[in-house]
Image: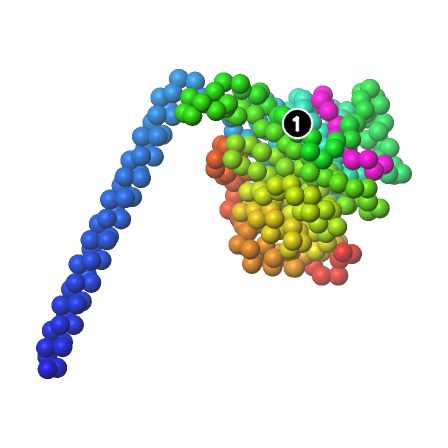
């Protein structure tokens, strides 16, 4: 009896092994097929006579220490969101020149805090700028007046964009996509203003927020919007789902609320903050929230300038996500 059971066990075991071998072979087959397909696809791409390399969009989350500055590039077209602190103007100018920037189609200054507009006077002076977008929130500071003076020198005025406004970036291609006849978005991207949706006492909540779209990829920028502005954006019913979210207010606990993160549901978050900054950014609460939502995090304080490149479908990064989950030192101002 005992022996027979052993024998039947052995039969069951060999049955299982047989099934596993069959499954393994089937999987190998699938892998081989996938590989062949992608090889064919690659060689097709190579064989194509005219590749529009300008269809790639690159977002540079520039390391400006404690502050924000993000360069967006598609083909020979550029836009800049914020310009870091006063001390970063020249370094930022050099970075932009290294990327081949001569003209910025747009300069967006999210709100008048020095860590966002400090370097803008240098940028306005040194580059041709198409349009300057700022919120209706003037500040009585030297830094703010320096920016206005630089605009005056260039005989420029800023535009106050309204939520819902959409702007194009790049060479809009009107040709139809041969695959399905829909208009091709290759070579161009667009961004839509999401906020401010009200007038706020607080400069941070008055930040311009925008959603940048390139093919299927969506990038969300909210400046230093805090919980109140975030709730207004969510309640406005705008579609703010994004693949990449630049963490609001440098990863402060006053932003990236649960309500907001549930609506954005990003795959990646980029935190722009300075090493050992006095605010303790990024705060542990925000890092924990990102971690529990399975968001991959990049940070300029640890990784320097971070770049994300979109081909309209996929996004590739210049470095691997940070895995330290290390919060700024506690005892910062907020
Ligand atoms: Zn800031």
| Residue 159 vs residue 249, the one in the foreground | 159
Q: Quadrant of the C terminus?
A: bottom right
Tell me what residue is drawn at x 75 percent, y 40 percent. Answer: 196
Q: Indicate whether 231 appears above or below 33.
A: below
Q: Which residue is mark 1?
A: 167
Q: In the image, which residues are magenta?
A: 127-138
Q: Position of residue 241 (x, y in %)?
A: 58, 43
Q: Residue at x 27, y 41 (%)?
A: 32
Judge whether residue 1 can be spotted in this image.
yes
The N terminus is located in which quarter? Answer: bottom left
Observer-nearest residue: 164 or 273? 164
> Was residue 219 drawn as part of the magenta stretch in this picture?
no
x and y, in percent, of residue 220 in the image: 63, 40
Residue 115's quadrant in the figure?
top right
Q: For the residue carrying disc 1, how many other residues have a C-alpha within 10 Å: few (<14), some (14-19), or many (20+)?
A: few
Instruction: Estimate the x, y position of residue 50 in percent, counting from the top left.
Output: 43, 18
Q: Nearer the viewer, residue 309 or 90?
A: 309
Query: Which of the 4 image quarters holds residue 242?
Result: top right
Q: Residue at the right extreme?
A: 140
Q: Is residue 131 magenta?
A: yes
Identify the element where label 1 is drawn: strand
């Amino acid at each position: 009896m005992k022996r027979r059971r052993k024998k039947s066990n052995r039969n069951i075991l060999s049955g299982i092994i047989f099934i596993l071998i069959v499954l393994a072979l089937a999987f190998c087959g699938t892998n081989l097929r996938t590989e062949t397909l992608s090889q064919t696809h690659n060689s097709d791409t190579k064989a194509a006579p005219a590749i529009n390399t300008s269809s790639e969009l690159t977002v540079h989350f520039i390391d400006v220490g404690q502050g924000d500055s993000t360069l967006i590039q598609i083909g020979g077209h550029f836009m800049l969101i914020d310009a870091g602190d006063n001390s970063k103007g020249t370094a930022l100018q050099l970075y932009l020149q290294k990327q081949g920037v001569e003209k910025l189609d747009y300069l967006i200054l999210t709100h008048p805090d020095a860590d966002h507009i400090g370097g803008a006077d240098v940028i306005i002076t040194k580059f041709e700028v198409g349009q300057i977008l700022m919120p209706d929130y003037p500040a009585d500071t030297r830094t703010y007046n320096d920016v206005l003076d630089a605009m005056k020198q260039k005989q420029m005025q800023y535009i106050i964009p309204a939520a819902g406004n959409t702007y194009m970036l790049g060479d809009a291609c009107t040709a139809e996509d041969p695959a399905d006849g829909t208009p091709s978005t290759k070579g161009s991207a667009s961004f839509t203003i999401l906020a401010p949706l009200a007038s706020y006492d607080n400069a941070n909540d008055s930040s311009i927020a925008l959603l940048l779209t390139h093919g299927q990829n969506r990038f969300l920028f909210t400046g230093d919007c805090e919980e109140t502005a975030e709730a207004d954006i969510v309640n406005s019913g705008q579609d703010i789902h994004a693949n990449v979210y630049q963490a609001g207010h440098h990863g402060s606990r006053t932003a990236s609320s649960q309500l907001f993160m549930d609506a954005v549901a990003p795959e990646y978050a980029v935190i722009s903050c300075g090493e050992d900054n006095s605010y303790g950014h990024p705060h542990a609460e925000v890092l924990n929230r990102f971690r529990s939502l399975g968001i991959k995090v990049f940070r300029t304080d640890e990784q320097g300038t971070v770049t994300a490149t979109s081909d309209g479908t996929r996004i590739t990064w210049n470095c691997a996500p940070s895995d330290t989950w290390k919060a700024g030192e506690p005892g910062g101002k907020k």
